[in-house]
Image: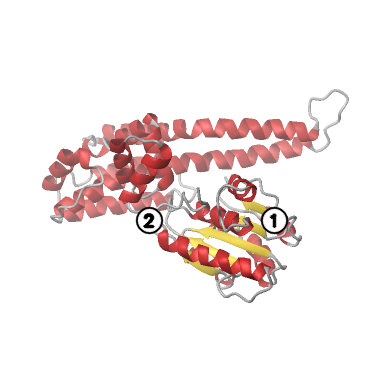
């Protein structure tokens, strides 16, 4: 299976990357070949597959057969264990300069193999200013046989000095039919479930996979989509806000516990803490720093889960707008057609648009320091407003 197999609905992008891989092969042989450069910026909406595209590109560049998907180079590059492919991935809100300096150090080394030293920064939009400055220096003067692959939602999310030195490639939102086919073929999902997941995810591959494979994820989404019809008074608004927050915390907790436990155990092992006769100098400070980072990450995981609920909620009101505008296309939430039709008749397009604006304003506010419970309570009250107008 080719390394490009998981890039759903990205045929044009794959053609461009295949051309770059061919050019890279010629460059390794000392031939002049346009189409290959030392720095790339892959952008696209959430769930479009930016990180998958970067890993597939890295695998193809390391492969003697341009991305066969079967050789050791392909398999290790895709799995994240190739000696000449390194990634910066963060669970924090930002990528700090220390993480960039570490990967820059590797960029200066010659590849262990005979091909490329590849560095992937999966969230280049989260670079702090010092981290961006550290990265810029090596992109401006790249070592031979070094390739940088940066990923971000949009070109504008990356500082101008870095993006101006990268070749840009844009991923599109995968079409529903392509996502459905992928879920059936690669994930073994039943056709009806795959079709639902593809439609409900709105082209977000990771979300589609979760909806197709996990009943709990489908149930959480179903509960969120009941909210618009349940906001009858102030009490119901408070209840809905609390339920969304509690569900997000529950969803995030399993991942939080798993990562926190492993990191704590790894830290103790590295310092020899608890080992008889070993004085773990510096362990207390390192443990305090780890706990601070874990707390920040936990907040982000919960906020990410809330954001997914808000996007599901927005899909309901988008369907309402669609009906109010007289569109006859399939709804995102076709299974809720009755509720959507009822709300479309009982309100106006202006009210629905205001509700959508309130959802997206809340999403933006949650990127800052606002309290999620307070933000959700305010949002539910806004969504209830105009219900009987």
State the image coordinates of residue 181 (x, y, percent, origin top left).
35, 45
In front of the other: label 1 or label 2?
Answer: 2
State the residue position of label 1: 103
Q: Is residue 89 visible?
A: no
Where in the figure is residue 55, as x and y percent of width and height?
56, 53
In front here: 106 or 36? 36
* Picture mark count: 2
The image quarter containing residue 182 is top left
The residue identified by callout 2 is: 173
Q: Is residue 26 toward the left or the right of residue 273 in the image?
A: left
Q: Which of 59 and 176 is in front in this view?
A: 59
Q: Which residue is drawn at 77% across and 35% down?
A: 270
Q: Residue at x 71, y 57 (%)?
A: 101
Is disc 2 placed on a helix, strand or loop?
Answer: loop
Residue at far left of view: 345
| Mark 2 neighbour density, 10 Å: few (under 14) some (14–19) many (20 or more) | many
Q: Are marks 1 and 2 in contact (CB under 8 Å)?
A: no
Q: In which quarter of the view is residue 171 placed?
A: bottom left
Image-based side of 305 in relation to 231, left or right: right
Q: In whole angstroms, how far apart are the C-alphas of marks 1 and 2?
A: 30 Å
Report crowding for label 1: few under 14, some 14 to 19, many 20 or more residues within 10 A (C-alpha). Answer: some
Residue pictured at 51% horizontal, 63% vertical? 17
Vertical comparison of 55 with 157: above or below: above
Q: Where is residue 322 in the image (x, y as percent from the top left)?
A: 19, 53
Q: Which residue is situated farthest in the front direction here?
A: 65
The residue sitting at 21% across, 38% down in the picture is: 335
Q: Nearer the viewer, residue 361 or 325?
A: 325
Left or right: 314 as drawn, with respect to 261? left
Residue 128 showing in the rendered view: yes
């Amino acid at each position: 299976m080719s390394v490009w197999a998981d890039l759903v609905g990205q045929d044009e992008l794959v053609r461009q990357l295949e051309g770059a891989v061919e050019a890279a092969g010629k460059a390794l042989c000392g031939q002049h070949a346009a189409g290959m450069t030392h720095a790339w910026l892959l952008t696209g909406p959430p769930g479009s597959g930016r990180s998958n595209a970067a890993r597939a590109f890295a695998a193809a560049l390391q492969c003697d057969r341009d991305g066969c998907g079967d050789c050791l180079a392909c398999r290790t590059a895709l799995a994240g264990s190739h000696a000449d492919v390194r990634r910066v991935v963060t669970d924090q809100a930002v990528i700090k300069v220390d993480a960039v300096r570490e990967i820059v150090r590797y960029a200066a080394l010659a590849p262990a193999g005979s091909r490329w030293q590849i560095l992937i920064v999966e969230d280049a939009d989260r670079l702090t200013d010092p981290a961006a400055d550290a990265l810029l220096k090596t992109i401006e003067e790249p070592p031979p046989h070094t390739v940088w692959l940066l990923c971000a939602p949009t070109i504008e999310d990356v500082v101008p000095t870095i993006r101006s030195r990268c070749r840009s490639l844009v991923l599109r939102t995968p079409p529903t039919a392509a996502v459905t086919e992928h879920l059936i073929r690669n994930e073994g999902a039943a056709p009806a479930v795959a079709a639902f997941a593809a439609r409900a995810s709105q082209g977000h591959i990771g979300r589609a996979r979760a909806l197709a494979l996990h009943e709990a994820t489908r149930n959480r989404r179903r509960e969120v989509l009941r909210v618009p019809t349940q906001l009858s008074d102030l009490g119901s608004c408070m209840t809905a806000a609390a339920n969304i927050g509690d569900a997000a915390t529950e969803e995030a907790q399993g991942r939080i516990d798993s990562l926190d436990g492993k990191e704590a155990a790894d830290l103790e092992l590295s310092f020899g803490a608890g080992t008889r006769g070993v004085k773990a100098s510096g362990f207390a400070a390192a443990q305090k720093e780890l706990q601070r980072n874990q707390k920040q990450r936990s907040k982000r995981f919960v906020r990410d889960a809330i954001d997914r609920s808000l996007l599901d909620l927005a899909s309901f009101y988008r369907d309402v707008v669609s009906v109010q505008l007289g569109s006859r296309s399939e709804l995102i939430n076709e299974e809720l057609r009755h509720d959507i039709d009822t709300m479309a008749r009982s309100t106006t397009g202006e009210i629905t648009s205001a509700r959508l604006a309130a959802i997206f304003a809340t999403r933006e506010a949650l990127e800052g320091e606002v309290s999620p419970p307070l933000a959700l309570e305010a949002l539910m009250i806004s969504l209830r407003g105009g219900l009987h107008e």
